[in-house]
């Protein structure tokens, strides 16, 4: 990571996508971003912010009528800070759309306290809590919320099946004590026990502690065969080291956010040879190839497989295309952008992929009033009435210090399994 990126993220500076348009711009739209640039989820937010800026840069180079800029604020991985920053963006800067947060404990308070009351659309690249779906069902989001990641209600079930398939039948659980961690553990436990697994203990932890020795000790009760660790890379590494140093078996099940080179390096690859995990999966497209080939150069060296990077580009692309569609009628208000977001992933539209050349095609089709279907880095997506998407789940393990994909389970298979288990 470059020194300039470290400096900008440390101070929560405004990240602006300058991008030069091929044609004179008739309007300028600022996209608000609230990202976890620092704190336990800082690795996610840094990658995510760069991805969104890359998407906006690509759209600007495509020559749209609107020049797109980003105003990025650091949530510090804290909900109260996120609300303050989102309030500044929505109520003071009057941004018509917000991208963020990354983790659910940041996204939810932004949604309930800022964007939903103001009726400003919000799209999260990586917040997977089932609570976000429930808020939609309860009519508390007003249809303004979208996300480019599948819900933990499905991922918890996928993780349970993967654990059983790998012979992990007696696990302890340590989970971050926030909305994400509580929901992931709950969904996993229901499916895991229904499939015949035994959970020996469930231990919540609070973030950013210097030591997790007491949590590791508590989790070892009941003689587990391994540990399901629901965490983020920094705290997760501290917990894993405490678990190993106290004699815990070096067998791990990990959540999507632990698919991280920083986590592997901090723990030590030799201790993670029996570590398995699940992530919200992808269906590779031409967008995937474009992103993988160009992201590292744009981001200053962040790898394209960094947590949240791929789906953050898609969030930025969808927002930018929605702004273009709204602007066709001279209306870039929050309501118009909200209405346009599902329309730019129209299953009946012409396929559009990532990058300036593809975005030129998209903008031309939009100007002609023709439908488009953006097929992103994570694959084609459709939003349901609650802003959720469905998609496959990637199954992986750590081998020789690297994350290796071992298989995939489809969203339909997970849904069928949940029905079979009576969930």
Image (cartoon, rainbow, N blue to C red):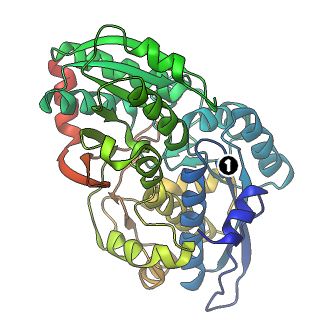
| Location of residue 203 in the rendering, given as x and y in whole percent from the top left corner | 46, 15
| Location of residue 313 in the rendering, given as x and y in whole percent from the top left corner | 49, 63
Q: Looking at this view, name the residue that lies furthest to the right.
A: 92
Residue at the image position 70 percent from the left and 89 percent from the top: 24
State which quadrant residue 50 falls in: bottom right
Q: Is residue 54 left or right of residue 93?
A: left
Q: Which quadrant holds the N terminus?
A: bottom right
Residue at the image position 31 percent from the left and 46 percent from the top: 270
Q: Is residue 144 left or right of residue 398?
A: right
Relative to the observer, which residue lies in front, 322 or 179? 179
Circle 1: is it few (<14), some (14-19), or many (20+) Cα within 10 Å? many
Please say whether residue 237 is visible from this viewpoint: yes
| Location of residue 239 in the rendering, given as x and y in whole percent from the top left corner | 48, 30
Figure check: 374 above or below 247: below
Residue at the image position 47 percent from the left and 47 percent from the top: 266
Q: Is residue 366 left or right of residue 278?
A: right
Figure check: 70 above or below 311: below
Judging by the rendered image, the residue that carries numbered circle 1 is 38
Residue at the image position 59 percent from the left and 77 percent from the top: 57
Q: Which structural element holds mark 1?
A: loop
| Location of residue 168 in the rendering, given as x and y in whole percent from the top left corner | 19, 26
State which quadrant residue 226 falls in: top left
Figure check: 98 above or below 419: below
Relative to the observer, which residue lies in front, 342 or 54? 54
Q: Is residue 411 left or right of residue 301?
A: left
Figure check: 369 above or below 107: below
């Amino acid at each position: 990571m470059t020194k300039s990126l470290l400096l900008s993220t440390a101070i929560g500076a405004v990240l602006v996508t300058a991008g030069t348009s091929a044609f004179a711009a008739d309007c300028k739209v600022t996209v608000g971003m609230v990202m976890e640039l620092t704190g336990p989820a800082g690795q996610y937010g840094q990658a995510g912010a760069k991805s969104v800026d890359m998407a906006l840069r690509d759209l600007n180079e495509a020559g749209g009528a609107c020049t797109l800029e980003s105003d990025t604020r650091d949530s510090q991985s804290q909900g109260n800070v996120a609300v303050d920053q989102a309030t500044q963006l929505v109520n003071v800067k009057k941004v018509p759309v917000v991208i963020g947060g990354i983790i659910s404990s940041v996204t939810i308070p932004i949604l309930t306290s800022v964007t939903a009351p103001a009726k400003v659309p919000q799209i999260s690249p990586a917040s997977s809590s089932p609570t976000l779906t429930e808020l939609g069902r309860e009519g508390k989001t007003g249809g303004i919320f979208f996300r480019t990641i599948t819900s933990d209600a499905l991922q918890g079930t996928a993780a349970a099946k993967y654990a059983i398939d790998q012979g992990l039948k007696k696990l302890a659980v340590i989970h971050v004590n926030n909305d994400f961690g509580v929901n992931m553990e709950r969904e996993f436990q229901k499916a895991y026990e229904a499939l015949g697994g035994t959970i020996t203990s469930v231990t919540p932890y609070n973030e950013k502690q210097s030591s997790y020795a007491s949590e590791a000790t508590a989790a070892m009760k009941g003689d587990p065969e391994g540990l399901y660790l629901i965490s983020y890379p920094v705290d997760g590494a501290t917990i894993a080291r405490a678990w190993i140093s106290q004699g815990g078996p070096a067998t791990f099940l990990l959540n999507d956010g632990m698919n991280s080179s920083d986590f592997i390096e901090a723990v030590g690859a030799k201790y993670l040879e029996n570590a398995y995990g699940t992530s919200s999966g992808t269906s590779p497209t031409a967008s995937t190839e474009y992103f993988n080939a160009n992201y590292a150069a744009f981001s200053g060296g962040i790898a394209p497989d960094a947590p949240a990077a791929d789906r953050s580009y898609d969030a930025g692309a969808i927002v930018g295309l929605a702004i273009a569609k709204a602007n066709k009628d001279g209306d870039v208000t929050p309501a118009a952008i909200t209405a346009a977001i599902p329309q730019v992933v129209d299953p009946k539209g012409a396929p559009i992929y990532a990058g300036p050349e593809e975005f030129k095609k998209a903008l031309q089709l939009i100007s002609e009033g023709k439908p488009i279907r953006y097929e992103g880095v994570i694959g084609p997506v459709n939003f349901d009435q609650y802003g959720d998407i469905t998609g496959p789940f990637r199954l992986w393990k750590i081998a020789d210090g690297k994350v290796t994909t071992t298989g995939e389970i489809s969203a339909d298979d997970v849904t069928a399994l949940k029905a079979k288990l009576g969930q």
